[in-house]
Amino acid sequence: MRKIDAVRIGAVLASITLAVLLITGDIDSDVAWTIAGLAVLSGLAALVSEKGWERFIARISKASVGPVSLELVTDVRVAAGETASKDDEEGSDSRPPKTREPDLTAVRLRLEWKLAFVAKHLLDPDCCDPEYLNVGSLFYDKYLTEVQARTAVAILTTRDLEVTALGIEGAKQFVNDASVFVDGVRATVFWNWVKKVLDEGRWHSTVIKGTSKRMDILAGKDKVSRVTPVLALDRDSDLLRRAVKRVATDPNPPPGLWRTIVVIPDVSEAEPGPRRPDPDNESEAGSKPGTTVHVVKLSELDEALGAKSTHAVI
């Protein structure tokens, strides 16, 4: 009752204020109606219980603009923020075809190409049959999170005409977020794979909250190491070189580290072993010597973390 009385008093005071402002000419009628409408909405919000308000917001998130749900728009935005580094330049012999942007069909073609690459070249053929690999299986096997899988499905199934219902700016933002997700989808699959191996190896692992494109993992048992997954496929991988430089010269590394590890796919042509930034390399000129970085293949990660024997990578 006290809440209702307070709302009533507030409404009366707001009405009196609006009337005075209208009479004195300080505001016009259009502005007054807008303020009145906002006041009504505020009053209704004040009368709704906390749980009722949560249910109301939940219903809004399930709503749709044409055939595209607002929840789906949010998923695509979140997935774009979670995606790993752009991986288009990795795999010099098999780069994605050039397509026009921004167009959802073009984004879909790049996604299908990259998923085919994941199935044929990245995942272990002994555990994954490329002919049966799809978004659902990647989600089931923890190579994609739920939001990432929902985003991939949306890109594969949403038509360009449906996206136009979001309006010019809304459609442009949706396609841009989808494109950012696809830019690093192979690297995202590999990052999730590394995290899966750590979890299944019963290593204690915690994601270091940094910039979304550079998420490292603290992993270990008695000794803690910094693990940086990098989709380095080429012998002279620029992604690998940049990652080594970043973690080796980090001015504020996590305290108490036993090792700094950069893990790359087993199919990578890059050479594993200890590395430091190369001062003779033009792109690394000016780098301090920094920490020694251990570059290892994924199948060797357990051993690099201090295990006596490696776990099978599945």
Image (cartoon, rainbow, N blue to C red):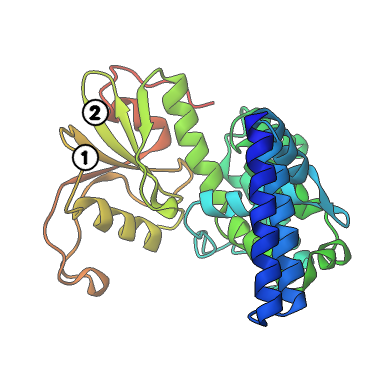
Which amino acid is tagged 1? Pro
Q: Secondary structure at mark 1?
A: loop
Q: Which mark is residue 189?
A: none
Q: Are marks 2 and 1 in contact (CB under 8 Å)?
A: yes
Q: Residue 120: x percent and y percent?
A: 65, 45
Query: Which numbered disc, 2 or 1, marks the residue that appears first in the sequence?
Result: 2
- Residue at left offset 41%, top offset 36%: 298
The reply to whether residue 130 is visible in this rendering is no
Residue 124 in the figure: left or right of residue 213: right
In front here: 273 or 59? Answer: 59
Of residues 89 and 102, the one drawn nearer to the viewer in this rendering: 102
Quadrant of image for the N terminus: top right
Callout 1 environment at 10 Å: few (<14), some (14 to 19), or many (20+)?
A: few
Q: Give coordinates of residue 288: x percent, y percent.
A: 12, 61
Name which residue type carries label 2: Val
Residue drawn at x 75%, y 54% as measured from the top left: 155
Question: Which residue lies under the disc numbered 1?
Answer: 254
**Which quarter of the rendering shows the C terminus?**
top right
